[in-house]
Amino acid sequence: MPEIDPGQLSPIAQKLLSPGAPAKAVALAAKGVIMGATPTDVISVVAALTRHADAEIASSAKASFPKLPSTIFDGALASNLQPSVIEVLLDLLPFEPNLVERVLRMPSLDQATVERLATQANEVIGELIATNEQLLLKFPKAIERLYLNRRVRMSTADRILELAVRNHVELDIPAYKQAAQAILNELIIEPTGEPTFDDVLFQQTEALAQEATLDPQVEDTHDTDDEGEEHLREKFLPLHQQHQQMTVSQKIRRAVLGTGAERMLLIRDTNRLVAAAAASSPQMTDTEAAIVAANRNISEDVLRIIAMNRNFTRSYQVKHNLVTNPKTPLTFSARLLPHLRDNDMRALTKSKNVPANIQALARQQVMRKQEKK
């Protein structure tokens, strides 16, 4: 956090923040008692003193800061405070819409503060930030933080994503290309001030997803019958039904932010954008990836994403499952095959469940190793 610059304050404030300032005057200033100072000076000096080297002064300033008269805060918030003073405001005052709305008007607002607001935002504050399109385009990272904030409305997330797409802003969020394409294909919801059906659906799904617990170490959301057909387990049916009501962009956001159960449901979605988003989720674990890699009902696109993820292919089980899955594109199976253990390689030479070209490659590997001996 940058230091407060006394040079931007009045001579009175500068004197109180100078190294040789009288101890009694500094002690009084820590309590907000500064004769002849403007509200901006009072707020800035007390904010600066919360970081004073003297622990007693710093403690006094922190305790007195929220208790300063409302007239002082009103005057200061109507001015243009330094970013470091704004940070103290956000640290020590209740994080509520009136404060955020006034902070958002300040020209001095910097990227770190805007990103912080977006990260901490609740539904109402998220909407406040989202309406300031000029600020979001200036600091695109704030769009990313809002989108990944579960408390932000789905309709708000749609609008800020549409803002980025319309202005050709590239965002560093999981499955951005898929989400952007979905937004382009859908009608964008305009702000109404009230939660829309989509918002309510998104919140209800969040609650339901927390109830539908899944231990990826031991289970999947589906069972497979003797004919290789998948059947959804009954306990995940309500969550699945909730997903069916969602738009593509909603499904993508849940695939990125949702629970393990949701990822395992949405990775099977018939829409390629949704399935790819689930496979690209930063929350997906190695164990989940191994389960997906072994599934012969999963799309090639999903298997390709897993095979291209180095974090996943460090896992031996993921490598093994990808190679033995006949739906894995040959390019990736062939690249991973040499990394299998000898006994697994020999098993592949006799397996009837893998493509003939994988069998042939496995035989070549076994023969090479025998020749070296």
Image: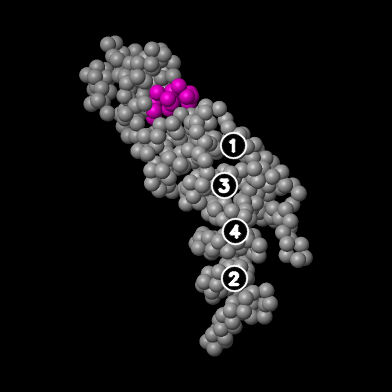
Taking the spot 68% from the left edge, 47% from the top edge, the residue there is 240
Per the rendered image, the range of residues in magenta is 87-104
Rendered position, 109 above or below 230: above
Q: Which dot, 3 or 2, sits closer to the camera?
A: 3
For the residues labelled 1 and 2, the Cα–Cα distance comes to: 40 Å
Q: Reading the chain from its start, which is encountered first: label 1 or label 3?
A: 1
Mark number for residue 114? Answer: none
Q: Amino acid at mark 4?
A: Ala
**Residue 55 or 71: which is nearer the viewer?**
71
* Residue 35 x/y as whole percent: 29, 11
Residue 226 counted in the magenta span: no
Element type at mark 4? helix
Is the residue marked by circle 1 packed among few (<14), some (14-19), or many (20+) residues within 10 Å? Answer: some
Q: Which mark is residue 248?
A: 3
Mark 1 or 2: in front is 1
* Residues packed near mark 4 inside 10 Å, few (<14), some (14 to 19) or many (20 plus): many
Task: Report which residue position mark 4 lands on.
Answer: 289
User: Residue type at mark 1?
Assistant: Asp
* Residue 317 to residue 211: above or below: below
Q: Quadrant location of residue 151?
A: top right
Front tag of 4 and 1? 1
Coordinates of residue 363 in the picture (x, y in percent): 59, 83
Q: Label 1 near label 4: C-beta < 8 Å?
A: no
The location of residue 9, given as percent across then percent down, is 25, 22
Q: Which residue is mark 1?
A: 198
